[in-house]
Amino acid sequence: MRFVLVTFNGSVSILVSTDLTLKAVDIIHLYGHRFKIECTFREMKQAIGGFSYQFWSKSMPKLKKYLKKGETHPLEQVTKPKDRRHIQQTVKAIEGFVMCSCIAMGLLQLMAVTFSHKG
């Protein structure tokens, strides 16, 4: 692993990369991009509720946080084609909601960049 020590405004950070071919400055730039992406996800979550979907299907079995050793996953126990189709539709609805949230976030960022200089 490669470690980079960064000091900025009195704060010290250690950045880590498993790619030994990267230069220290490249690692710093990559972390900068990662920070922007994480900020975008935080805004999607907190500002526009991009991950607060409430889709469910009666066909979906109750999911457990942890499975016992050898226990089949509850979704594998769904055998009726109609129930499986309902679960797939629910997953598609969730994906669609998150995708619309991504588009909305992109539009908000575009508007902020475009109109930020106008008072």
Image (cartoon, grey):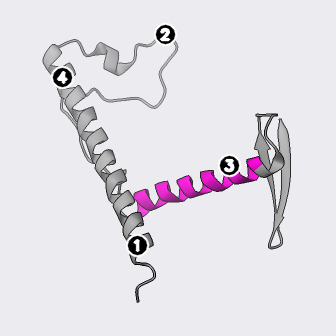
Q: Position of residue 63 (x, y in %)?
A: 36, 29
Q: CA distance from mark 1 to mark 3?
A: 25 Å
**The furthest residue to the left:** 82
Q: Which one is closest to the eye, mark 1 or mark 4? A: 1
Answer with mark 2 or mark 4, whichever residue precedes in sequence: 2
Using the rendered image of the protein, determine whether residue 7 is visible from the camera's viewpoint.
yes
Would you name the residue on which mark 1 appears?
114
Locate residue 46: give its quadrant.
bottom left
Dominant secondary structure, magenta: helix
Q: Indicate which disc residue 46 carries.
A: none
What residue is at 30 percent from the left and 39 percent from the top? 95
Q: How many marks?
A: 4
The x, y position of residue 50, in whole percent, is 35, 54
Q: Earlier in the sequence, mark 2 or mark 1?
A: 2
User: What residue is shown with label 4?
Assistant: 85
Residue 30 shows which numbered tag?
Answer: 3
Q: CA distance from mark 2 to mark 1?
A: 55 Å
Q: Is residue 118 left or right of residue 13?
A: left
- The amino acid on which the numbered mark 4 sits, given as a three-letter code, is Arg
Task: Tell me the amino acid under the disc marked 1.
Answer: Thr
- Rounded to the nearest angstrom, the CA distance separating label 2 from label 4 is 26 Å
| Magenta span | 26-46
Q: Mark 3 or mark 1, which is nearer the start of the sequence?
A: 3
Task: Judge depth for marks 2 and 1 and give the one in front.
Answer: 1
